[in-house]
Amino acid sequence: MSEAALSTHTAEFLKRRHGAWIAGRHETDGLDGELDVLDPASERAIAKVGLGSAAHVDRAVAAARKALSGPWARLTPDERTRLMLRYAELIESRAEQFTEIAVLDNGMPWALGQSTAAFCAVFLRYYAGWTSKIAGQTLPSTAHGKRPDELFAYTVREPIGVVGAITPWNYPFGMEILKIAPVLATGCTLVLKPAEQAPLAGLLLGELALEAGIPEGVFNVVVGLGEVAGAALAAHPGVDKVAFTGSTEVGRLILKAAAGNLKKVSLELGGKSPVVIFPDADLAQAIPGAGMAAFMLQGQNCVCGSRLFVHEKVADAVAEGLAQFARSLPVGPGMEKTNMIGPVISAEQRGRIEGFLQSAEQQGARALAGGKRLDRPGYFIPPTVYAGCSADMRVVREEIFGPVVAMQTFGDDDLETIARRANDTVYGLS
Ligand code: NAD
């Protein structure tokens, strides 16, 4: 699709100058330069976004603290529910724009991009129902020698305060809404630091929140580099909680940075999940199932099923079927709607994945499909299947975050043994 064919909303949004979104307006003063947002399918710049500094994080946190005690704090739960429902409706009315931005910003296939507005609306509506159901408890206390009917003890649930949300680039809109929706339901406020590789979704969600009537300062967005704006947010004394989704490595840094004022922290980190195919499986279902578990969203997915265990009786059939399946998936720009595998996010990420492909060859794995980048513009790695893998290989041990599956076999072992192999990873499983 050419840029001329983009919806008016998207074309206008991409043309605008985006700064740090603080208290309902774009601040462009004192930016740390500008970032070219690249379409990973063409490597062309589609928008320019200002890079926020630690000073912008400071101002965004101040705006979020102010909003905590402003009109936002005086809304009833029912009023917050209504605003959230209005926000969900506004997002659904922009479904086309969400699809276009998700595809251009992240590179995902069109069909996945089409799921983003509905994903956001579903989560907002779910959390909108919670505003009136977050209640404290009455406690039968016998403190100070009193009987429970002589001492009234209770707990009141209050907003945690300002939340610093730091998100990855792999599912723009989705990763952000999972932070914003609970913040709105609980009466907290937010400073979002989206991933610099795909920052547009966060900015658009911030603008639409204001348009839906959510007061200024409740939802602020500072696009910036992880080690600058992300680190400043994680360490900021005015932030009460950090909600982070990203790599395990950065998760460790966040924990340390949050220790200064003992922030609450939630971390959603990397993955290396197993898929197990037993000899009695219906292979017509199991093969595409295992394939899409590994290749969906180019494998840039924390629930990616990148370690495949197959019973030796069906190993040949699965290997052949999976290689055929991998080769049958149309690879190309997400804007061409029939493509099912898009580019990976960046040249850097493609380079990382190629490092894994080289290591697989050096360590003796056999590539049955893919294994090399495509010779065309855009950061394309085709779906890749490795057979003959063993537990010590890097492609088996480490998160690749690319469309790569590493196959190992098992014999007539008991379930305990198979489970032990499937669970043999430092990552959480899904
Ligand atoms: P990343 O850890 O490199 O970056 C995530 C975010 O952290 C980005 O916004 C980045 O700018 C920021 N950041 C980087 N350095 C920072 C620092 N020193 N201080 C504060 N913030 C910093 O991860 P990524 O490459 O964007 O995303 C891929 C990772 O995310 C994978 O490991 C994937 O498994 C994980 N992920 C997990 C889930 C989940 O729900 N568990 C979901 C999606 C992605």
Image (tube, rainbow, N blue to C red):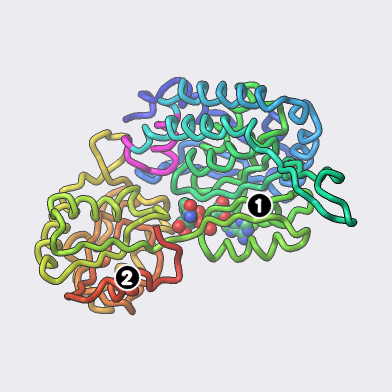
Q: Quadrant of residue 314?
A: bottom left
Q: Residues in magenta?
A: 98-111
Q: Earlier in the sequence, mark 1 or mark 2?
A: 1
Q: Position of residue 71 (x, y in %)?
A: 77, 26
> In the image, is 315 to the left or to the right of 217?
left
Q: Is residue 14 visible?
A: yes
- Disc 2 secondary structure class: helix
Q: Nearer the viewer, residue 337 or 76?
A: 76
Which residue is under mark 2?
419
> In the image, is 399 to the left or to the right of 389?
right
Q: Nearer the viewer, residue 369 or 378?
A: 369
Looking at numbered disc 1 in the image, what kind of residue is underneath it? Val
Q: Is residue 30 visible?
A: no
Q: Position of residue 310 (x, y in %)?
A: 20, 67
Q: Nearer the viewer, residue 252 or 32?
A: 252
Asked if disc 2 is less than 8 Å from ligand 1, the answer is no
The numbered mark at residue 119 is none
Looking at numbered disc 2 in the image, what kind of residue is underneath it? Ala
The numbered mark at residue 242 is 1
* Residue found at x 17% / y 75%: 412
Can you tell which of label 1 and label 2 is closer to the viewer? 2
Q: Position of residue 60 (x, y in %)?
A: 73, 41
- The quarter of the picture where the C terminus appears is bottom left
